[in-house]
Image (cartoon, grey):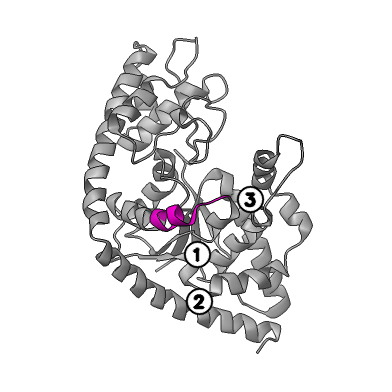
């Protein structure tokens, strides 16, 4: 069976964008592949964080995975930090990666802008720059065939492939070359108030982001307050109508109704009708999710038992890969 690996950072609460762009894909693929899904807590250290909140968010993320339909008994769900090989291989891959490659990462350039202080100086964490190499370590340790990603992560996957090819040529057949899996619809959900930027857990104005733990009534209001335009026509055009297009994408991904069918459905209706229907759909979705989530998070012992079992499995698997790499490069 082909193997998939992916993970999400436990920073802040999950958004509807995290579900549509990543977790929904995990759920859809779980019966076709051997799945390794992790909580990317090491990646979460690359930005400002509170230790207590980080610890809480890790378990909340695992509970959310299950509440959204990921089978924790069938799939290997684990904490990234529980597996020492991730950081060990990270250093080896760092020594086979160039500054030029990392400088070309567009996500790094985008994130740098957020670290400019009021006096014009910058305080950029090194982890932001090195993030793609740790991501490569996450992937290559498991000999993953595919990596489900959002469109904005494609460049990172390409770097992973380049590093793997480079090391394979130099040391022999060490790593499997992974392929990215990008959803055709919903790979990039945009902010409700500013549909030119991605919906994010860290956006300054939370009114443009729907969190999975939002009060359903608040989420309803956020949809109703979403930015549209003055064209008064429900159509999918991300250039001329980014706001409406974003609402159609969310609607389509949650209901599995095609965007073209939605356009037909709302052909002679106004934006208010689209928003009202979508707001109700999102509200119901969150209510259902939160009901399941509360039951799952209440049984912490069961979650921790699963995580401990999976950590042992992953440690054995990744140590075998690490020994292979150590031998190839002359450390053993």
Quarter of the image with the N terminus is bottom left
Residue 186 location, x and y as percent?
45, 38
Residue at the far bottom: name it. Answer: 332
What is the crowding at mark 3: few (fewer than 14 residues within 10 Å), some, or many (at least 20)? Answer: some
What is the crowding at mark 1: few (fewer than 14 residues within 10 Å), some, or many (at least 20)? Answer: many
* Left or right: 171 in relation to 6: right
Against 98, residue 83 (above or below) is below
Nearer to us of marks 3 and 1 is 3
Which disc number belongs to residue 145? 1
Which disc number belongs to residue 155? 3
Of residues 86 and 297, which is closer to you in this image?
A: 297
Sequence-wise first label, 1 or 2: 1
Residue bearing mark 2: 318
Residue 181 location, x and y as percent?
49, 52
Residue depicted at 69% across the width and 56% down the height: 126
Nearer to us of marks 1 and 2 is 2
Question: How many numbered marks, from 0 up?
Answer: 3
* Disc 1/disc 2 C-alpha distance (Å): 15 Å
Q: Helix or strand or loop: what does disc 1 sit on?
A: loop
Against 301, residue 158 (above or below) is above
* Disc 3/disc 2 C-alpha distance (Å): 24 Å
Sequence-wise first label, 3 or 1: 1
* Left or right: 76 in relation to 160: left
The rendered magenta stretch, by its main secondary structure, is classed as helix
Q: Quadrant of residue 261?
A: top left
Is residue 38 visible from the viewing direction of this image?
yes
Q: Helix or strand or loop: what does disc 3 sit on?
A: helix
First to last magenta residue range: 48-57
Quarter of the image with the C terminus is bottom right
Against 58, residue 330 (above or below) is below
Residue 185 location, x and y as percent?
44, 38
């Amino acid at each position: 069976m082909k193997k998939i690996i992916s993970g999400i950072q436990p920073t802040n609460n999950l958004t509807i964008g995290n579900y549509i762009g990543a977790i929904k894909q995990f759920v859809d693929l779980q019966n076709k592949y051997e799945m390794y899904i992790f909580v990317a807590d090491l990646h979460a250290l690359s930005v400002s964080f509170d230790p207590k909140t980080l610890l809480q968010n890790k378990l909340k993320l695992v509970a959310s995975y299950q509440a959204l339909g990921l089978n924790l008994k069938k799939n290997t769900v684990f904490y990234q930090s529980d597996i020492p090989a991730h950081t060990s291989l990270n250093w080896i891959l760092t020594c086979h990666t160039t500054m030029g490659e990392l400088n070309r990462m567009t996500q790094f350039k985008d994130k740098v802008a957020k670290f400019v202080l009021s006096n014009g100086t910058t305080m950029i964490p090194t982890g932001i720059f090195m993030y793609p190499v740790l991501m490569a370590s996450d992937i290559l340790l498991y000999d993953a065939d595919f990596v489900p990603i959002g469109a904005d992560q494609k460049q990172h996957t390409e770097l992973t492939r380049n590093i793997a090819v480079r090391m394979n040529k130099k040391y022999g057949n060490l790593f499997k070359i992974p392929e990215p899996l990008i959803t055709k619809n919903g790979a990039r959900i945009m902010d409700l108030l500013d549909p030119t930027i991605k919906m994010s857990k860290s956006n300054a104005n939370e009114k443009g982001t729907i969190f999975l733990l939002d009060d359903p009534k608040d989420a309803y209001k956020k949809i109703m307050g979403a930015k549209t335009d003055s064209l008064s026509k429900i159509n999918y055009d991300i250039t001329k109508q980014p706001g409406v297009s974003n609402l159609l994408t969310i609607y389509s991904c949650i209901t599995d109704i095609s965007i073209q069918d939605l356009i037909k459905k709302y052909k002679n209706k106004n934006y208010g009708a689209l928003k009202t229907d979508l707001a109700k759909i999102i509200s119901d979705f969150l209510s259902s999710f939160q009901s399941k989530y509360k039951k799952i998070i209440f049984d912490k012992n069961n979650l921790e038992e699963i995580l401990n079992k999976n950590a042992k499995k992953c440690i054995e698997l990744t140590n075998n890969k690490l020994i292979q790499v150590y031998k190839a490069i002359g450390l053993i």
